[in-house]
Image: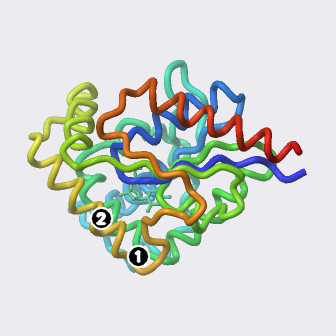
Amino acid sequence: MDKLIIAIDGYSATGKSTHAKALAKKLNFTYVDTGAMYRAVTLFGLNQNPKNIIDLRLLNNSLNQIKIHFEEGDEEQQTFLNNENVTKVIRDPRVNKNVSMVAAQKPIRSFLNDQQHLLALDKNLVMDGRDIGTVVFPNSFCKFFLIANPEVRAKRRYLEQLEVGFEESLEEVLQNINSRDNQDESRVTSPLQKANDAIEIDVSNLNINRVFNMLYNQVLKKLESIKK
Ligand code: DC
C-alpha cells in the first residue's frame, strides 16, 4: 500500500514545523522538515567559498557531494549534512539570507524532490514545506496551507531566534520574511502557492492549541474518508 503523506505548506514562520512535528508524534508518522533540506544545501554552498558567497553554478554541479539525513534527538529532530550535525547553524541569518535564492534553482529542487520521495518509500510522513501539496506529493491525502500576516510571523521568528542566540532586530527579521516570501512566490520552479485541494488556515489570531486541533480534526476526517 502507498504510504500516507500529510502536506503542510505555507509561509515562513506560520508554525508549520511546530504543527507538523506535533501531528507526526500524535499519529506516529515521521516528520520531515523540507526547509531544513534547502537550508542544508545553502550551508554547503556558503562553505564552498571562503568569502561565504554562493557560486550557484558550482553548487548546482556539486549536488552529488551532498548527503542530508535526519536523526531523532532528545527534544528536536537533528539535521545532518554529510554526517555533520547542522541543526543549529542552518538557522543562522547567513542561511536565511541565501536560502530562497538557492531554493529557486531547478536542479536543486529536483535533487531534493528525489530525496523527499526516497524518504516516503517506507514511512507515513508529515512533510512541511512550500511545494509539498502542489509538486512533491500532489496525491497527499491531506493538505494544509498556513498563512498569517507578516508582522505576526516576524515577531514569532524574532523570539525563536533570540532563544537560540541569533541577534537580529525585529525589523531585520520582518525584512527577511518579506523578501523570502517574494522570492518564494515569484520563482519559476515550484513557487509557493496553495494547492487547489489544500485547506487554508489563517493563523494570525489563533492560538497554537486551536490551530493544532483544527489540523488534527481535519486529518481524522480525511483518514476516515479514505478508509471507506
Ligand atoms: O521553512 P523554512 O523557512 O525553513 O524554509 C527555508 C526556505 O526554503 C524558504 O525560504 C523556502 C525554501 N523552501 C522551499 O522552497 N521549498 C520547500 N519545500 C521548503 C522550503
Figure check: 85 above or below 207: below
Local SS, label 2: loop
* Residue 206 falls left or right of residue 107: left
Label pair 1/2, CB-CB below 8 angstroms: yes
Return the residue at label 1. 58
User: Residue drawn at (52%, 69%), measured in percent from left and top?
Assistant: 109
- Residue 49's mark? 2
Image location (x, y in percent) of residue 43: 37, 54
Image location (x, y in percent) of residue 113: 61, 64
Amino acid type of the residue that numbered disc 2 sits on in the rendered structure = Asn
Cβ of mark 1 under 8 A from ligand 1: no
Local SS, label 1: helix
Figure check: 193 above or below 224: below
* Residue 177 falls left or right of residue 226: left
Give the quadrant of residue 161.
top left
Most foreground residue, 58 or 146: 146
Figure check: 101 above or below 216: below
User: Residue drawn at (72%, 44%), measured in percent from left and top?
Assistant: 222
User: Residue drawn at (84%, 53%), measured in percent from left and top?
Assistant: 2
Image location (x, y in percent) of residue 144: 54, 49
- Residue 162's mark? none
Distance from the alpha carbon under mark 1 to that under mark 2 = 10 Å
What is the total number of numbered labels drawn onto the structure image?
Answer: 2
Q: Residues within 10 Å of mark 1 (few under 14, many from 20)?
A: few
Whichever of callouts 1 and 2 sits on the residue coming sooner in the sequence is 2
